[in-house]
Amino acid sequence: MAEIKLIVNSKEVFARDPEQTLLSFLRDGLGLVGAKDGCSRGQCGACTVIIDKKAVRACTRKMKQLEGAVVETVEGLAQNGELHPLQQAFLYCHAFQCGFCTPGIIMASKALLDADPHPTDDQIKQAIKFNICRCTGYKQVIDAVRLAIEIADGATKLDVFDNRGWVGDNPVVKNGVERVMGQPLFTDDFHIDNCLQGRVVFPAYPHAKILSIDCAEALKQPGVVAIATHKDIPGKKFFSQELFPQQILAIDKVRFIGDPIAVVYAESAQQAYDAMPFIKVEYEVLPVIATAEQGYDPESCRVHEEYPNNFANRHVQKGDVERGFAASDVIVESDVSVGTLEHGRLELDAALAELDEKGRLVVYGTGQNPSHMRHDICKAMNLTEEQIRLVTRPAGGAFGKLEDLVCHIFAALGTMMTKRPVRVTLTRDEVNAYTTKRHALKFHYKVGAAKDGRILAMQTFTLGDTGAYSSLGDFLNSCTATMGSGPYEAPNVDFNSHMMFTNNPIAGCFRGYGSTQVSVAVETVLDQVAEKLNLSPFELRRVNGLSSGKQTPSGQIIEYSCGFHDTINAVQTAFEKDGLPAPSAPGKKVGFGVAGGFKNMGFGNGMEDGAGCSIDLRPDGKFQMYTGGVELGQGHDTVVCQIAAQTLGVPYNDVDIGPVDDDYSPYAKGSTSASRMTYCSGNAARTCSIMFKDKLLKTVGGLAGVSPSAIDMGKEGIVELKADQLLMTYAEAAKLIADNNASVKQEYYYVAGECHAPCDDNNNIDMDMINHRIHIAYLFAAQVAVVEVDEETGKVKVLRVYVSNDCGRAINPAMVEGQINGSVVMGMGYALSEKFEMEDGYIKTKGYKQLGLPTSLEMPEIKAFLIEENHPFGPYGAKGLGEMALNPTAPAILNAIYNAVGVRVTSLPVDPKKLAAAIKGDKIYR
Ligand code: FES
């Protein structure tokens, strides 16, 4: 076979398989893993490289098309140890979070700048329109490209590794250089010799009994080494986050179209797929529960014989809701429905497993809850926790999806069966089918208010679809009930939430976790209350907004750190200063909408909110940290290093942090979720640093014959206080400690303050304030969205979003801004374009593009204002942010649409055709 000759990063290389994609050739053939595979069909842009000066998605090109081509990848950008201006600028501007999209976006930007060194902002947006970034909201990406132009022109010179780095600074993120250089970070980037490929077999029907599974013919197919069914699982055949277990591999029934039946382990992925049709499965097809309403009908067939479909109910009650309605001057009722949604994280789910030299099972993969994952893997494999090492890799976005196990057990099972390394990866369609989604919820709200705007009564009925298994559906049900009034005080409430099993994909954690859906219902119904009372939407929210001393529906008194009113004032002032723009053309209308939002920090509800941390002094004089929190792109590692650096009094660049790894990390319980890691890991890092400092000074003082009180930690080493001079560098201190067989390693496990599960009786709380504290802290937000609606087509363009957030002290303001920008664009997608469609349990939404994720072209102008209402027990006053900025965006956009064209949208996302019909028709969009 003739070889195909091409140039990659200035080197001549040869390909032999004309049908191989360029992406596969780069990653598998040349080990250039900077180009990422997020969809395999040219829809995500993560594999963008430059071919003959043009940005091209590498998965769309076959090698037979590339004879003589000149290919540039991200690995070729840095020259002579110096980062390319784009790489420097992306680092400096915090233009990435998880970094999975970053090499592709950098290459698309480079192709643009090579062709036109001074493009406009619109040209930059056009150049990256095929590169989806789920994290950043694109704003800091555009900023970075602009900065790169200045660097290339010589107008700006950057020192990206300057001395920034303590609390309130914006240092370069940990592992940032690897991200902009496309170096291996993600699970699928690592090569292990002799590795088998595991691929998962999914059912033909969404609801069916399994009568038999016959793998005999499939086992004879070329390259197949083993096939696992439930019979091959040596231990527990279920995993779970709650009381309701999920089967690992189908036992006698499948309950949704992504319920795995078997895993084929073969020498190549293609061989595994080729063998799948030879697996014979006999089914007895059952009726499908396709909606929450069908699940609510007690006559429907059960998804789980042992539980009713209506498996979780929560009732939160306070005061006398009927008396409240009777006293109300206005009553508004509203039905709102929000659909299932895919997280759309770019990285395809993957896991690797192997046996180490001691015969221990080592599992590599991403995950938000390593301690729980380790527990589930051990139970399934019948191993003790000492017989397994879990190594958590950085994630290409998470947004809650990685709370649940995906490929880990399948990879572990393959290794235990074959004694060989095994990699299991899902395709994009398999991610859509198997992995968790945002809960679809239907709300009925009834709100009564007095003339002056005070809410007097609130009643809700909520119906949720958790899919075939619960994941954390029961707990989410609790959230929709306890947070049912949004960030507002209501003296009389009666909130009922029900969660249904259906035959749809499993719903699980997704940024906001119930509070996001509630926000759409509360904020749109309050807009109607304001209109009926002829009150400004800002004023109505101020009248009812929570503040210190006010009470949530579940009876919790807000004790401190509540900046909600300041967030409303900030966005109102900024919006009114700018005013509404004029419509861009006849037939278009502009409008604005307001929404508030809040989100709990931490699990609360009686669960422990804790985090572990360890610090040691390395031989090179740097400080090595490990925590139980996982870096998911949200900035966990950077934030805890900033906190430790400041507490120790040393440069940020001298503090390193490793991944969550059983060989090194301290004990950690609970997941990286619920906006809790800045608070919990940050407090762990701060206290651990204080303890470490004390230990270091005592140890070094003792060994050097100096009183510990006479020395301190300085930026370069241990200093003598009286003489104000360096006693020894940290490397010298490390040597002194090692030479004397001493150790200064410090571990610490932080547990946040007491909180409790919601009480049944939320009245008469005066004597019982602590027992009604269900969360340690709350985060608050307000937004104003400005939209333009085309009355003819129903198309909505979000022009501007004013955002204000109370996150406590901002440890890293640039990363806070990144979370805000990403949340706003995600919220805009939730309102206008994102959908995940199913029909009778079958998935209609295939691929990645079809998810409707916003691109750079839809990016609105975002004006952000931070309200740093410090929390008395947060690390340096911090609370957190990751989810809260998302909550107000969708309802603010819906309220803005109403303000523009007088149509009240009651279901998401807004379909232009339906909106156009409603504009011409009954003014209600359902
Ligand atoms: Fe772009 Fe995560 S940084 S997808």
Image (cartoon, helix red, strand yellow):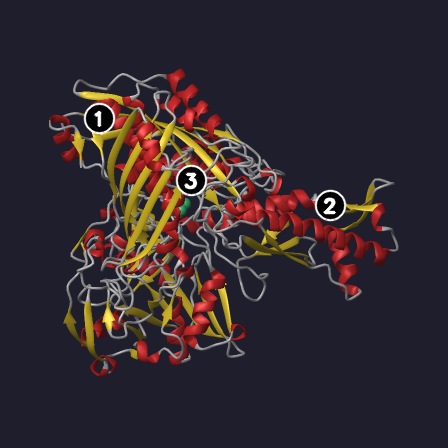
Q: Which of marks 3 and 2 precedes in the sequence?
A: 3
Tag 2 residue: 716
Q: For mark 3, give the secondary structure.
A: loop
Tag 1 residue: 789
- Residue 738: % across, % down: 75, 63
Q: For mark 1, give the secondary structure.
A: strand
Q: For mark 2, give the secondary structure.
A: loop
Q: Of the residues shown, which amino acid type is indicated by label 3? A: Pro
Q: Does mark 3 have its CB less than 8 Å from ligand 1?
A: no
Is residue 548 toward the left or the right of residue 826 in the image?
right
- Residue 789: % across, % down: 22, 26
Dot 2 alpha-carbon crowd within 10 angstroms: few under 14, some 14 to 19, many 20 or more = some
Q: Which mark is residue 828?
A: none
Q: Which of marks 1 and 3 precedes in the sequence?
A: 3
Q: Of the residues shown, which amino acid type is indicated by label 2? A: Glu
For the residues marked 2 and 3, what is the alpha-carbon distance in whole angstroms?
52 Å
Vertical relation: 708 (above or below) 487? below
Q: Do the residues labelled 2 and 3 touch (CB within 8 Å)?
A: no
Q: Which of marks 2 and 1 precedes in the sequence?
A: 2
User: What's the residue at 78%, 45% (across, down)?
Assistant: 712
Vertical relation: 531 (above or below) 675? above
For the residues marked 3 and 1, what is the alpha-carbon distance in whole angstroms?
36 Å
Is residue 475 toward the left or the right of residue 646 in the image?
left
Q: Of the residues shown, which amino acid type is indicated by label 1? A: Val
Tag 3 residue: 553
Is residue 100 toward the left or the right of residue 838 in the image?
right
Is 456 or 429 nearer to us in this picture? 456
